[in-house]
Image: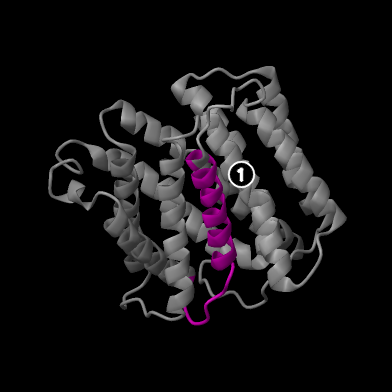
Amino acid sequence: MKNLQTWIYPVMVVIGAASYGILSTIIKVAMGNGFTAAEAVTSQYYIGFILAVLIYFVSHRTFPKLRGWKVLMLSGAFTAATGMVYAHSLNYLPASLAVVLLFQFTWIGMFLDCIANRRWLKRIEVISLVLLFGGTILAAGVIDADLSNIPWQGWAWGLAAAFCFSAFMFVNGKQVEGIDTSTRLVYVSLFAAIVITVFQTPEIVWNGRMFAEGLWVYGLLLGIFGIVMPIYLFSLAVPRVGSGLASILSAMELPVAILASVIILHEKLTILQIAGIGVVLFGMMLPSFFNRTPKVVEKLEDPLL
């Protein structure tokens, strides 16, 4: 049982991050079928909230109680901000460079964890971050790209997406006493949907784009892989492994994003990209091998565990 607890939570983080990696491909498919990125993102958070409510009422018969609202509100706001800011960065950046900038969340998240816990980076963490950075550049295929014409707004929005995702991981690692994971999922997705309503395209609900024109199909996929799975799994696992290690394990998003684009969008995969994916995976696994005893909470709040 102890050995299971040692590995199950890092695996949950990896699966949650991998689900994020599928999102960009789904959004590209939606755009290829006549929808905008903003419409796809809006449908993601609306349907994600509906799914969260359904999951809650399948296992509960009472209305979800709101506790620790500041943590839940920040978590929802940061996950919504990540989706919006990253999508906006693609207006200025090639997709490969946008991925590289987004993946700066690995070291940003690690430093946030060090500041919050008043500790120094471990040697293995430094090695892992260097490998992740180098592997990301190889895997994203930007070595031969011309970066001279990239506007400053692109760099700013790309790094802002990385900060938003790091903040989401950090806040989501904060436990809220008195609520289980299903309840947390409901309120995080609710606050995220509120932010999306203010800044994106809520008119898809009444102009026919959502249901009459089939946007809901992409919203359902995005809601499952971009809301339900990552928030649920991160809520369970990040408090156990720590936000620092969770940031490193979340690098799994990059290989999945690249493989999904190759399989579904038929994009080319070079030898350098394959090597980069291998380096990312190796750098991601290093801390887990050298730290076999991540923080485990003895009293689990979720009834499923």
Q: Is residue 178 above or below residue 32?
A: below
Q: Is residue 298 left or right of residue 267?
A: right
Q: How many marks?
A: 1
Q: Compare residues 268 and 292 and report the one nearer the observer.
A: 268
The region drawn magenta spans 153-180
Q: Position of residue 164 (x, y in %)?
A: 52, 56
**Image point (79%, 63%), residue name:** 293
Q: Compare residues 71 and 146 and report the one nearer the observer.
A: 146
Coloring basis for residues: one colour
Q: Position of residue 264 (x, y in %)?
A: 45, 25
Q: Position of residue 58 (x, y in %)?
A: 34, 65
Q: Is residue 294 left or right of residue 34?
A: right
Magenta stretch prevailing secondary structure: helix
Q: Position of residue 174 (x, y in %)?
A: 57, 72
What residue would you read off at disc 1? 103
Q: Is residue 116 left or right of residue 164?
A: right
Give amino acid for label 1: Phe
**Image point (43%, 81%), residue name:** 67
As for residue 104 lying within the magenta part, the answer is no
Q: Neighbour class for label 1 at 10 Å: few (<14), some, many (≥20)?
A: many
Can the viewer see residue 41? yes
**Image point (53%, 81%), residue name:** 177
